[in-house]
Image (cartoon, rainbow, N blue to C red):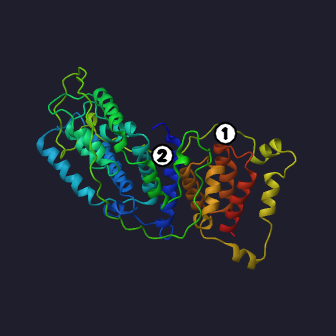
């Protein structure tokens, strides 16, 4: 119980795992999309798939909240019924490409590790959600998306008093007492780590706060494979739970009537937060100093980027140019090289890398691509001391436009 695990390292592993699994699935078919049944079977770890679905539900609730206005009665029974029907139809037409699915899977992986590594935080985030006045019905509804330690959390909910106003503070405090009394009933983190290691190598030491900084390393290249079938969960004997003494709930204002689990909740009582959108870093303040001048000032003894450009754009024979030409940068960059670019040029941000490569692939001339690399991208991510990696990216651009 004394081991402290790093949320940052859990998130880092989640991003690498999502990138690896998406490489396997979308690599041979970059334009493929996933529907609901495919999401539920995407990985062999059922908890990952369930938490992706939970995020989709949260996104739907957030978008539904934006439909509300002062001009229409969204609480009217026919409107609620129509919205519920609309949601049921929409849920049968899920369509996720890689750009939309990968961040959802990364967050699901981080949350999966947190269920065992940080039960209290996971209870507050995944079961309580954003509801100001939680209800037993809402807790049980959110419990549907838990597969790991479900019996443990179920035991807590089953022992809550019926008909009592439950405040967030009361539930959080009572869960801490419950967890302290029943911590031995928890699934060991080692078991979850072994299950995830079949997808991407991981050890419990990789997640410790005082563990090695670089413990979680990029995965070695693998051949794309189809997603594994989801195994049937093994039944576990329900543990015996110790119920802590009942504490009086803190005084709270009268709660609004609970919305039925089958209706679409209002914005203030949404039980699941929408996924945080991924934004590209804002443009940093531009400067008129060219990249090769910055390199010359920082490294007087090293060759400047202009000389590197002249070397990489030296005329070649027609046979050589045809042999090295590539159709797109995305396909030309190997997995190891992609990890190198993400870590060295984009500060470890996977989505920034994909957005930049997609934009470079959309440009029509080598001059435009080179200008974007040495101008906007260099200034945004400060590549003044990244000449080696910038040079490799420029060589790939020359091959694309050869």
Vertical arrangement, residue 373 with respect to residue 62, above or below: below
- 10 Å crowding of disc 2: few (<14), some (14-19), many (20+): few
- x and y percentages locating residue 335 in the rendered image: 60, 63
Q: Find disc 2 in the rendering and name its residue.
A: 278
Q: Secondary structure at mark 1?
A: loop
Is residue 63 rendered to the left or right of residue 114?
left
Vertical arrangement, residue 133 with respect to residue 143, above or below: above
- x and y percentages locating residue 108 in the rendered image: 41, 50
Q: Quadrant of the N terminus?
A: top left
The answer, for residue 300, to whether it is visible in the render is yes
Residue 37, numbered label: none
Is 101 in front, or is 285?
101
For the point 70% across and 39% down, which residue is it?
A: 287
Is residue 218 rendered to the left or right of residue 2?
right
For the point 65% across and 67% down, which residue is it?
A: 400
**Where on the picture, by quarter, is residue 58?**
top left
Marks 2 and 1, the one that precedes in the sequence? 2
Q: Find disc 1 in the rendering and name its residue.
A: 286
- x and y percentages locating residue 363 in the rendered image: 60, 60
Given the current orientation, which residue lies at the most extreme top position? 251
- x and y percentages locating residue 390 in the rendered image: 71, 54
Vertical arrangement, residue 309 with respect to residue 64, above or below: below
Gap between marks 2 and 1 measured at Cα: 23 Å
- 10 Å crowding of disc 1: few (<14), some (14-19), many (20+): few
Is 59 in front, or is 213?
213
Is 166 in front, or is 60?
166
For the point 82% across and 41% down, which residue is it?
A: 297
């Amino acid at each position: 119980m004394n081991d402290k695990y790093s949320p940052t390292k859990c998130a880092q592993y989640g991003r690498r795992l999502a990138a690896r699994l998406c490489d396997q699935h979308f690599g041979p078919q970059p334009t493929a999309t996933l529907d609901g049944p495919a999401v539920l079977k995407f990985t062999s770890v059922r908890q990952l798939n369930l938490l992706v679905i939970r995020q989709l539900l949260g996104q739907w609730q957030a978008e539904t909240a934006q439909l509300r206005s002062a001009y229409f009665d969204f609480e009217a029974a026919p409107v609620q019924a129509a919205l519920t029907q609309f949601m049921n139809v929409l849920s049968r037409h899920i369509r996720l490409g890689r750009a939309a699915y990968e961040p959802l899977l990364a967050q699901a992986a981080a949350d999966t590790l947190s269920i065992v590594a940080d039960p209290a935080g996971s209870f507050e985030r995944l079961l309580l959600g954003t509801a100001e006045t939680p209800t037993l019905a809402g807790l049980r509804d959110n419990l549907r998306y838990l597969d790991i330690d479900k019996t443990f959390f179920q035991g807590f909910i089953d022992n809550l008093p019926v008909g009592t106003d439950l405040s967030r503070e009361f539930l959080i405090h009572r869960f801490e007492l419950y967890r302290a009394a029943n911590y031995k009933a928890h699934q060991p983190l080692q078991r979850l780590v072994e299950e995830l290691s079949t997808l991407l190598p991981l050890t419990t030491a990789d997640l410790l706060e005082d563990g090695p900084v670089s413990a979680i390393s990029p995965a070695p290249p693998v051949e794309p494979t189809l997603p594994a079938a989801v195994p049937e969960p093994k039944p576990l004997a329900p543990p015996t739970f110790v119920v802590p003494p009942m504490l009086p709930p803190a005084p709270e204002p009268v709660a609004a009537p609970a919305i039925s689990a089958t209706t679409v909740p209002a914005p203030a009582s949404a039980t699941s937060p929408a996924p945080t959108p991924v934004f590209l870093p804002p443009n940093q303040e531009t400067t008129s100093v060219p990249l090769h001048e910055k390199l010359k000032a920082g490294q007087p003894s090293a060759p400047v980027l202009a000389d590197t450009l002249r070397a990489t754009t030296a005329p070649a024979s027609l046979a050589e140019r045809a042999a090295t030409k590539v159709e797109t940068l995305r396909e030309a960059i190997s997995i190891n090289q992609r990890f190198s670019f993400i870590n060295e040029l984009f500060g470890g941000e996977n989505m920034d890398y994909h957005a930049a490569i997609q934009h470079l692939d959309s440009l029509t001339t080598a001059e435009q691509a080179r200008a974007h690399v040495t101008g906007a991208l260099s200034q945004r991510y400060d590549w003044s001391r990244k000449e080696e990696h910038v040079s490799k990216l420029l060589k790939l651009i020359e091959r694309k436009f050869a």
